[in-house]
Image (tube, rainbow, N blue to C red):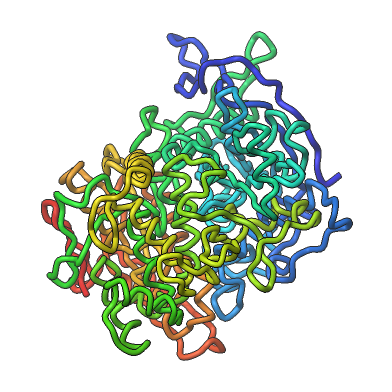
Amino acid sequence: MKRTLTRFAALAGAGAALASCGSNSHMPDELNTLPSYLGTITSTTYDGASDDLLTAGLGKTGLAAAAPAYADPANPTASELRRNAIWANYRAVLDINANSGYGTLYGPNVDAKGNVTTSEGKVAGTEYLAYADDGTGNQNVTLMVQVPASFDPDHACIVTGTSSGSRGVYGAIGSAGEWGLKNNCAVAYADKGSGTGLYTFDDDSVNLQNGIRATRTAAGKNGNFAPVLSDADRAAFAKLTGRVAFKHAHSQQNPEKDWGKFTLQAMEFAFYVLNEKYGVLASDNKSHIVRLTPRNTVTIASSISNGAGSALLAAEQDTKGLIGGVAATEPQIQPKTTTGYTVRQGGTAATAQGKALFDYSTYAALYQPCIAGSAGRCTALTAKGLLVAGDLPTQQADAKARLKAYGWLPDSDVLQAAHAGTNILVAVTYANAYGKFSVTDKVCGFSFAPVDATGLPVAFTAAQKASSFATQNGIIGSVIYENSADGIPKVYTAGISPSNGQADQSLDGFLCLRALATGMDPVTGGVLDVGLQAQSARVRAGMAEVAATGNLHGKPAIIVQGRSDTLIPVNHASRAYLGLNAMAEGATSKLRYIEVTHANHFDSFTNALPASIVPLHVYLFRALDAMYASLKSGSTSSLPPSQVVRTVTRADATTPITIANVPPIAATPAAGDAINVSGTVVDVPN
């Protein structure tokens, strides 16, 4: 059999017993105790041939091929959904193109030392799943631990893989997950309470933990997510064609405020699983004695994007010593303040620094559609005094200039147009999340639904619902503008603003979101009306809940980010966090920052824009290698200094990327590449 299925009984207990006791005669043995927040644990063992932990049996070749088909698309099995979720999530964070480095610089067939093998890269082992919840069934954060068959308890290591974006629990499978499994580490995953959770009103259905669909009633407390609504409100909203709710936007819990906690819980879950598996049976023949603790296990918090931010927040909040170090790339991290530190590049202070995600994403949502070629948006912004008058190229140049003044780097110019749709999704989703609004509030006139070719909302088909666990990235459907001046709700790109009667990609709605971010009218600078003012207060309170302190409590950390990052600009994230950390820890800080030229937030652009972009992914693995070596040796002196890594792009997509394009992180960077922190001043070279 390729798999076996078992269940752990839900044991009573107040928390994970993680203290080191061993066999010291003067200390009692510590019994392994199930954390109180964990529900039923399911485990599945994979043989590494027909199915496996890393590729779901697809291997390097299958991950690069077309999506696997379901035997019955209307009724996919849980194992099929898992397989396709791994296929989709792996490809979502990597460029699966041989010329971009897949199969040579990264991929399942590239071993832990970077050697290209003929292997398909399948990893045998056992996968454990459980919900973390407060007993209500309303949180149901999915946690997962993968233990490779190669795990050695005498050389134990655990790596966290909190999902990026709003993705489900397999969101970090191709990033921290792959590195951990290749290095014989257990991997502790979390979906952050914002993972795939599609609720559809027309049939009152939800996702279960394994992705299978069920009615809300049948799912009970085992559903991933359903909005909290009265039956009357539910029925009324169901009359709107195709409208959906999803967990990140509509859980009314602002899950981001707990992303650090959920990452720590995943680590505790991993210790519990490992001690059940490798601990000696106690005298009661029921409990296991704790064998593995943070003192005899290398533990690294890692991931990318939102998962990377979660790793840093977990390190800040770690009071149990669960995390030994951090290695993360392109973190979505939001400093609690924009002042008290200074970010400079080439000796010149940044035009803006340390702004919150919702602040800069709502700003980008105004201007990026103009840069992407929407003449209607450019004209409408000009009429409201938010762009200079002129022809389209003049307006687009002004839009880019405004974004640079707001903290983006010139390196992002080539990517601004491509990010318009992404920042729209971010702005609308996070407005709902931070304000803890109900799906029925339709904040700023926006909702979510799939659309047809004309941009009108339509219902998900039965097959689309059935496969949603595998196909959705956690932000589900298209953004619908309910307030279009013609009275017809439609996709935001076709929306007509009531204030001007113009087809301007629903500018009025995005000016409303901007008002929520700043607390003032974005056109006049005046006071908001009472209703919008109250909504803004709610959103800004939610923003404050997720702010980082910068205090890593002496933990070593390596942050890597691409200088061309257009979704999460370096001046607002990594550079600013380095300054915030300097305020918090001063000279005792063990944080290193690696900035990679020509790298951006999405490696999928690597082959699309070969003359501008190189893959950042290889630097995540290099950072993890460096952190692992440092923690194994017990010395931070081997950590690479903060530096700019200068990469080399290609002339065209037909030229394969090689190590020459993505040089290593230097053990001793040249003076012109060193990033220096003096007091609370961060100096990044040009």
Asked whether 440 or 55 is in front, the reply is 440
From where the camera sits, is residue 182 visible?
no
- Residue plotted at (35% across, 78% down): 413
Up-down: is 240 above or below 501?
above
Splitting the image into 4 quarters, where does residue 133 fall? top right
- Return the x and y of residue 90 as percentages of the image width and height: 62, 60
Up-down: is 458 above or below 412?
above
Splitting the image into 4 quarters, where does residue 5 fall? top right
Asked whether 643 or 487 is in front, the reply is 487
- Residue plotted at (52% across, 42% down): 192
Q: How many marks?
A: 0
- Return the x and y of residue 355 as percentages of the image width and height: 28, 55
Splitting the image into 4 quarters, where does residue 604 fall? bottom right
Up-down: is 606 above or below 199?
below
Asked whether 257 or 153 is in front, the reply is 257
Up-down: is 198 above or below 451?
above
- Residue plotted at (46% across, 57% down): 426
- Return the x and y of residue 127 as percentages of the image width and height: 68, 41
Could you tell whether 141 is left or right of 433 in the image? right
Could you tell whether 46 is left or right of 622 in the image? right
- Return the x and y of residue 635 as percentages of the image width and height: 31, 45
Quadrant that contains the C terminus? bottom left
Could you tell whether 182 is left or right of 298 in the image? right
Could you tell whether 293 is left or right of 103 in the image? left
Quadrant that contains the N terminus? top right
From where the camera sits, is residue 526 visible?
yes
Asked whether 672 or 392 is in front, the reply is 392
- Residue plotted at (44% across, 54% down): 624
